[in-house]
Image: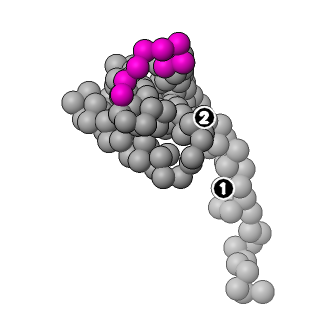
Amino acid sequence: MRERPLEMLLPAGFICAVGTCAVASLAFSETAARVAVMAAAVGLFGSWARRYLAALATGVMAWCFATGFLTHAKGELAFGPDDLLRLAAFTAVALAGCAWGHTRRVRRPYRLMRADLRRTPMLLRRLHGRANGVSRTDR
């Protein structure tokens, strides 16, 4: 499976951050809930993208939008202790989401193989389970 190109992931991450900021600002009135929605979106984007640079860039963009529009009223970026803590949280969630996406990609062939092994007896019963060639419609 090919990796997704970085030239497409960076704009996709920007769209994800802007869209999530708009949805979070309309859906929630509390700052903590807004930031949690943004962090969840960054983690999901990181797991989908599976590229660390794109996930980190999306985390930083989401932090800019969360700080400028969701926590401060007039679009100001600030670097107070709470803002830097949010930046660290967004980058950590982005990296964790990306690592989770890599783990799911690596484990996928093994899950498919296990599913095929569980399905095999059922397929054998369907193909060879009828005695004397009698089908259910003949009974």
Residue occupied by mark 2? 32
Which region shows up in magenta?
Answer: 76-84
Q: Is 82 situated above or below 122?
A: above
Residue 5 visible (yes or no): no
Tell me the tag on residue 123. 1
Q: Is 139 situated above or below 78?
A: below
Q: Nearer the viewer, residue 112 or 130?
A: 112
Tell me the tag on residue 68. none
Residue 51 placement (x, y as % from top left): 37, 23
Residue type at tag 2: Ala
Residue furthest to the bottom in view is 138
Q: Nearer the viewer, residue 81 or 105?
A: 81
Q: Which residue is located at x 72 percent, y 86 percent?
A: 138
Q: Is 26 situated above or below 1?
A: below
Residue 89 placement (x, y as % from top left): 54, 20
What kind of element bears circle 2? helix
Residue 125 placement (x, y as % from top left): 72, 59
In the picture, residue 64 is in which quadrant? top left
Query: In which quadrant is the N terminus drawn?
Result: top left
